[in-house]
Structures are given as C-alpha cells and as structure tokens.
Image: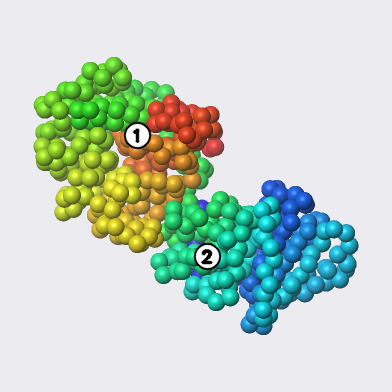
Amino acid sequence: MKILSAAQIKSVDAYTIEHEHISSIDLMERASRAIVNKICSKWNTKTIVKIFAGPGNNGGDALAVARMLGELSFKVYVYLFNTGEQLSPDCMKNKQRLLDYQTESHNYGPNGVEFVEVTNSFTPPKLEEGDLVIDGLFGTGLSRPLNGGFASVVKYINAAPATVVAIDVPSGLMCEDNTYNVMNHVIQADFTFTFQNPKLAFFFPENEQYVGQWEVLDIGLKDPETELTQTPYFFTEGADMASLLKTRSKFAHKGSVGNALLIAGKKGMAGAAILSSKACLRGGVGKLTVHTPEANVPVLQISVPEAVVEADTDPNCFSQSFDTHQYDAMAIGPGIGTESYTVQAFIEQVTMSKCPMVIDADALNILGSHRGWINQLPRKSVLTPHKKELFGLISTTRNSYEELERTRELCARQQIYIVIKGAYSAVVTPEGAVYFNSTGNPGMATAGSGDVLTGIILALLAQGYGSEPSARLGVYLHGLAGDLAAAELGYEGLISSDIIEKLPYAFKTLKGTK
C-alpha cells in the first residue's frame, strides 16, 4: 500500500473525479458514508455525537456525516466554523443539504441534528464522558500550524473526557513533517479513520497521542500509477509478503537450504546466542554454526542441539576473526559485548567476509563508536538497530521524520539496508524506499526480541532470499509470530521464546494468504 503525500492525495482525488466520471460532492458523499459505517460499527444511537466542522472539504465531510447520522436516528450537534465567511464549494453544498434535511425531518423526537454556524463568537458545548466528538475541522490540505480561535477549539476538545474521532487526519497534524508544527494545537484523537492511504505521520511514535488507533477506509480512489503518485514510502501487507515465500523442493536437503553462521554471545550473554540460534533454525535454515566463547558452549549444546557450536579461542568473548567462505550468510552482534579484542575482531570479520550478513546489537554499538568503519561494510549488509543504536549511526534527531530521512541518506550512501525496529518497523533500502511493517504488537517490547529477528533474517539470507526480501519478510514474520503469541498469551506475559515457538505458525499463516 502506497503512503502518499498531501499533494499526491489531492492529485488522486482529481484523477478519480475525472476518470470515474463522479462529481467531487458525490466522492465526498462516498467518503462520508464510509466514516458513518465505521462509526455505526463501534457506537449505537444511545451515543450523543458532537461534530466540529471547518470551512474546507474536511468540514464538508463532517457535515455530510452529521446528516447521515441524523438519518440513522443518532442525536447530533454540529458546529460549523465559518468565521471567514468563505466555505469551500462542497462544504457549502453539504451545509445546504444539512439544512434541507433539518427542514424535511423537523427534528421530531429525542434524536435529530442541531446545527450551529459559528461566524463570530462561540460558546462551546459541554463535552462529557460518553460523548463522541467528531473532528472535521481541517484535513490533509493544512500547510501551517493552527492558531487563534481554531487553536483554542482544539485545546478545548483535547481537555474534554469525550471520545474523539478524526476524519482523515487529526486537525492540525501535517501529513509528513511536523518539525515546525505547534503540537499542542493538534487534535488528540482516540481514533482516526483515514481515506484510501495511510499518512506518513501515522507511523511516527511521537504522533501516537494525536492519531490514536487508525484505520484506512477504502473509498475507491483511483491511482493513475504515474509520476504523480511515485513515492518512496509503503505499508507492507500480508499479500505482499506471501508472494515472496519460496516453495521448498521435494528433494531439498540441509545442504541446499542454507548454511548459516552466527557470531553471538560473550560470557554471561549466552541467552542472546540461544535466542538467535533457535529463531534461525525455526526460520528454515538447513545448517547453523554458532561461534561463541568456550564459556557458552555447554549451555548452547544443551539448549540448541540442532546447531553446530564452534568455540572461540578466548574463553570469554569473540576475539579473533576467521574464514567464512563455506557459509551462505552470517550474522554478528547479539550479546558479543564491546571489549577491545571483540571490537578489533568485529571489523576484521566484516571486512574479510564476502557472504551476505546481518549486523545487530553490540556490533551496531561498535559501529556507533567507530563511525568511519561503516564505510568498510559489504554492500547490501542488513543492519537491525533499535532507536538508540540507530542514533549511534546517524546522531540524535529532532523527530522521527528527520531520523527517517537521515537513515535513507545513509542507506543510499553506503548501499546497505537498515531495519529501524519498533512499532511499524521500517525497512530502508539503498534506493531510498521505506517499507513500514504491518505486524507486531507492544508485547514484543521484551528482552531478546531483537535477537530473534536477527536469527530469522539470517535464516532467510542463507536460503538465498536476498537482502531486501530477507529484511522485509523477516520483519513481517517476526511481527506475525508475535501477534500469534499475543493472541494466546496477552502482551504482558509474552517473552521472546514465545515468538520463536509461534514462528512455524507464522510461516503457515502467511502461506495461507497466497
């Protein structure tokens, strides 16, 4: 699914109107009906609805929603802010339709629509717990922060205990970059029902308090598939990932489905090596060798009997590089520490190894302390940092948008792949594309989850999936396994081993979507 900019969304609207031979007001009616259907799936007519409509097309949507809810016997109060006496044409049409509806229905009974047009002063209604507030003040066309009276209305809504639904985007939120926005002038929605495509700002953690739970509503917009809608941003869905899965040959054997190397664990950190190893094996690799200090050998051989364990010359840490020509892929970093011997062995290892590789955890911390070394990474390497590890590579940023842009620049410059781990984990490619992941849940915020992801991506690399498919498919399967585990166990009790146990079912589930 494409993630389009505000300008591109406007182009898609225009294209749909032209090529589907539908008027803009009828397209607005279609969008409003989608909002109403979603509201009716969550709330009933006992809920009092209070709608705040702006002077533009977002306000037109809100007025149409008010009329439709009134027709369904909801009690609706709608406030149209027309302080400039300049409504958009479609907003004006929906205002008249609402007035006509009021005249025809006479508002008999306890339900109906009460309409107030605000042109000067405004006495705000009481917003109570249990009320449903619908935000239709401003949509994707906003290009500057809200101020004055609209900022005051936003603050009033945010201070209320009512549930807030935003139409398309929360009023005041820019679709992409909010670096220079005034964020306390942005609606804090509990739900955002957006049209056709998600907005880039939805994927940034600092915007969660404004967007709330969001959902994409299909309103039949037509993408011209031209330069008008070329975008580097995408939201990965199951069908995309199912198409990447390989079919295993009937004559497959352990030598034909990948020979992987994992360099992991120092003394006291055998758990990282165990988790990565188990995940790699569950990821379908034919053979796995784990290189780890002698201190970890006994526990690894007991915990992961399917893996070959190779002891480092140092009893406590990874200390010396070695030849890797026999391996199809390698991963390095989980729990290896940052001792001086390990630091030197790491850079020697990655520069001499020619196979595809995953770089994670302490290996990323080493790179963060020796930034010049990133120039020595093999092309198409896959790096899997969480936020703190990423800042070691790109420096601290003001917000997630700037973080993403710097990561794109780094990937292009070094021709590497970076997986930014977190909610909606993002796979960033050397071409500058960004694929946000749709699986995963808060229960996966647990120690060792990243080690599991490293093992999955290593398994896919060793099986010949290639760097980009391995990163994208690995992230998706990791999240899907976590979702299956959370469905059974909940968030709080979920641990990384649960993700590994559900990994075979994640493969099975994904294959079922083909």
**Colour pattern of the rendering:** rainbow
- Marking on residue 186: 2
- Marking on residue 58: none
Q: Is residue 352 visible?
A: no
Mark whose residue sits in front, 1 or 2: 2
Judge from the rendering whether residue 473 lies leftward or rightward of residue 23; answer left or right. left
Mark 2 surroundings: few (<14), some (14-19) or many (≥20) residues within 10 A: many
- Cα distance in 3D space between marks 1 and 2: 36 Å
**Viewer-nearest residue: 85 or 480:** 85
Q: Residue at x 29, y 45 (%)?
A: 383
Q: Residue at x 17, y 26 (%)?
A: 293
Q: Is residue 340 visible?
A: yes
Q: Residue 310 appears at what percent x and percent y?
A: 19, 24
Q: Residue 316 appears at what percent x and percent y?
A: 15, 28
Q: Residue 193 appears at what percent x and percent y?
A: 61, 56
Above or below residue 367? Residue 104 is below
User: How many labels were placed on the picture?
Assistant: 2
Discs 1, 2 touching: Cβ within 8 Å: no
Q: Which residue is mark 1?
A: 448
Q: Residue at x 51, y 68 (%)?
A: 185
Judge from the rendering whether residue 395 lies leftward or rightward of residue 469; answer left or right. left
Residue type marked 1: Gly
Q: Residue at x 63, y 82 (%)?
A: 84
Above or below residue 396? Residue 462 is above
Judge from the rendering whether residue 503 lies leftward or rightward of residue 130; answer left or right. left
Q: Residue 482 appears at what percent x and percent y?
A: 46, 35
Quadrant position of residue 108? bottom right
Q: Earlier in the sequence, mark 1 or mark 2?
A: 2
Assign a secondary structure to mark 1: loop
